[in-house]
Image (cartoon, rainbow, N blue to C red):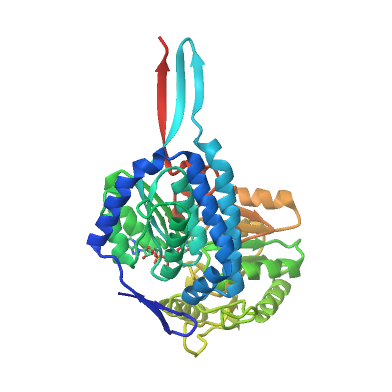
């Protein structure tokens, strides 16, 4: 049985039977049998099913947000924001799939025609994370279904009720039970799913799990995408509006209680404005309302997973032992559930875990730098490479710096942002492959090369 716990108060919400290896094998067989029929269904019908799924999200938005908040602890406004943001992603896929899938003739001369078509991969595994279950799930299953694949979807064990809601909505929208299957369970269910003869693995989660999956799947020569963690840096130049930069980067660090793959995790500030920036940043963070995630006023909720409290406490102890200056927060909030104070450190450096290891919580280090060169060097001093941001009033300066930063996404005067129109990818321990943009539609297909001689 899988126990679902409310992270805001530690209470059990539900106990669900989880899928064992035999149940997962049966789901695989059904998905395999159904896939050719789904791929042969006219695209217009697949698009209509996803359009109905979108309508279901709009209709049930408040209920779905409440379920998400109950099991993940996301403040309710942020749960609704996630669902509202999902609509734009679905709209992008609805608008772009037909054009992206259309076969293309790329050569036609002397009776020889060359063409590229896009075939579905077949049956794919979608192993997902809990922190933005609608976003990271739909980045995979929406384009995968639109392009004619069957999907074995394993939501995180921390977002299972949401995963089951997604399944119900898709099934009610005309995607058959066999074409989209929800697998209930934790890591063991994920591993059992990978043991099936699937055609592709699309994983979102931690580097630790991603590297295990890469080892398990590598010899099979199937498509593997890993969207993993980050240690995303921001550099604040000396020419900014300090209050505006502090407000924007504090939100980037603390939104979703710091549990976003693209949360701001490290801040470098030019020495000329360092003290003013730190003061404005701490002021901003002290203004955040911590509390019951079902309340409209709450901005910081509990951590979703209890063990992360230990990770944060360890980063705090390590930073203090190495001379960091604690400006606010720094400890658990002693009440039922997984609560940690929003925490800000200055006087940090890269010997500290806080500046090297993904924190995935409401904690941030701010480091003073002498100038642009030092900032770029420090931003690139990481095993990860998901996103990076520069705040400056000078666009040319920002673009020059961002061109030197090793990251899948770069931001000027913004952060913690994802667009359906742009590819979402990372370097190094942040993963391989991509979702979103038209590349994130093509990625669920196999390009087939046609050489057609007319005589
Ligand atoms: P996780 O690695 O603990 O779990 C992810 C999924 O893998 C879960 O569904 C889990 O049940 C499953 N799993 C665990 N062990 C497995 C195994 N041996 N085989 C197969 N599946 C297994 O990650 P999480 O805590 O759910 O998510 C947080 C992490 O995800 C953070 O590092 C975050 O940065 C990252 N993330 C990345 C992105 C991105 O787009 N790059 C987006 C969201 C989250």
Which residue is rendered at x = 53% and y = 49% of the image?
Answer: 436
417 over 272 or under it: above or below = above
- Residue 384 rendering spot, x and y as whole percentages: 48, 58
The answer, for residue 178, to whether it is visible in the render is: yes
Q: Is residue 249 left or right of residue 164?
A: right
Along the viewing direction, whichever of 281 and 299 lies nearer the viewer: 299
Which residue is rendered at x = 53% and y = 41% of the image?
Answer: 97
Which of the image's four quarters has the N terminus? bottom left
- Residue 312 rendering spot, x and y as whole percentages: 48, 77
Which of the 4 quarters of the picture holds residue 26? bottom left
Which residue is rendered at x = 29% and y = 53% of the image?
Answer: 28
Which of the image's four quarters has the C terminus? top left
- Residue 433 rendering spot, x and y as whole percentages: 45, 48
The answer, for residue 405, to whether it is visible in the render is: no
How many marks are shown on the rendered structure? 0
Q: Is residue 29 left or right of residue 204?
A: left
Along the viewing direction, whichever of 286 and 171 lies nearer the viewer: 171
- Residue 258 rendering spot, x and y as whole percentages: 55, 71
Which of the 4 quarters of the picture holds residue 112? top left
Quarter of the displayed picture in which ligand 1 can be seen = bottom left
| Residue occupying the far left of the picture | 22
Which residue is rendered at x = 26% and y = 52% of the image?
Answer: 196
């Amino acid at each position: 049985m899988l126990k679902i716990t409310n992270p805001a108060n530690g209470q059990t919400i539900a106990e669900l039977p989880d899928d064992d290896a035999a149940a997962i094998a049966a789901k695989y067989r059904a998905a395999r049998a159904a896939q050719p029929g789904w791929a042969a269904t006219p695209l217009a019908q697949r698009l209509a099913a996803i359009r109905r799924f979108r309508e279901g999200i709009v209709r049930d938005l408040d209920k779905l947000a409440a379920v998400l908040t109950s099991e993940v602890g996301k403040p309710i406004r942020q749960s609704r924001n996630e669902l509202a943001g999902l609509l734009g992603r679905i709209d992008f896929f609805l608008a772009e799939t037909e054009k992206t899938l259309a076969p293309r003739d790329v050569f036609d001369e002397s009776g020889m025609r060359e063409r590229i078509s896009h075939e579905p991969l077949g049956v794919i595994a979608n192993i997902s994370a809990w922190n933005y279950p609608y976003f990271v799930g739909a980045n995979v299953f929406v384009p995968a279904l639109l392009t004619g694949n069957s999907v074995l979807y394993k939501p995180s064990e921390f977002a299972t009720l949401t995963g089951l809601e997604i399944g119900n909505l898709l099934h009610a929208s005309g995607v058959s039970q066999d074409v989209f299957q929800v697998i209930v369970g934790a890591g063991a269910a994920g591993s059992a799913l990978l043991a099936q003869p699937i055609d592709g693995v699309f994983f979102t989660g931690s580097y630790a799990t991603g590297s295990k999956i890469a080892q398990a799947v590598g010899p099979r020569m199937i498509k593997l995408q890993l969207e993993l963690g980050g240690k995303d840096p921001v550099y604040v130049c000396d020419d900014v509006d300090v209050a505006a930069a502090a407000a924007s980067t504090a939100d980037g660090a603390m939104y979703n209680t710091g549990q976003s793959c693209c949360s701001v995790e490290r801040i470098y500030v030019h020495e000329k404005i360092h003290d003013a920036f730190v003061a404005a940043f701490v002021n901003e963070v002290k203004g955040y309302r911590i509390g019951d995630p079902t309340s409209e006023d709450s901005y910081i909720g509990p951590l979703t997973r209890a063990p992360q409290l230990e990770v944060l406490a360890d980063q705090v102890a390590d930073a203090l032992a190495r001379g960091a200056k604690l400006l606010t927060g720094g400890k658990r909030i002693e009440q039922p559930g997984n609560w940690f104070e929003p925490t800000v450190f200055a006087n940090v450096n890269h010997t500290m875990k806080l500046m090297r290891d993904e924190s995935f919580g409401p904690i941030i280090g701010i480091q003073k730098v002498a100038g642009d060169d030092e900032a770029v060097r420090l931003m690139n001093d990481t095993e990860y490479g998901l996103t990076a941001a520069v705040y400056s009033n000078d666009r040319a300066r920002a673009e020059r710096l961002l061109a030197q930063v090793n990251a899948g996404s770069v931001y000027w005067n913004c952060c913690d942002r994802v667009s359906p129109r742009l590819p979402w990818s990372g370097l190094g321990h942040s993963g391989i492959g991509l979702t979103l943009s038209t590349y994130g539609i093509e990625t669920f297909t196999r390009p087939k090369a046609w050489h057609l001689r007319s005589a």
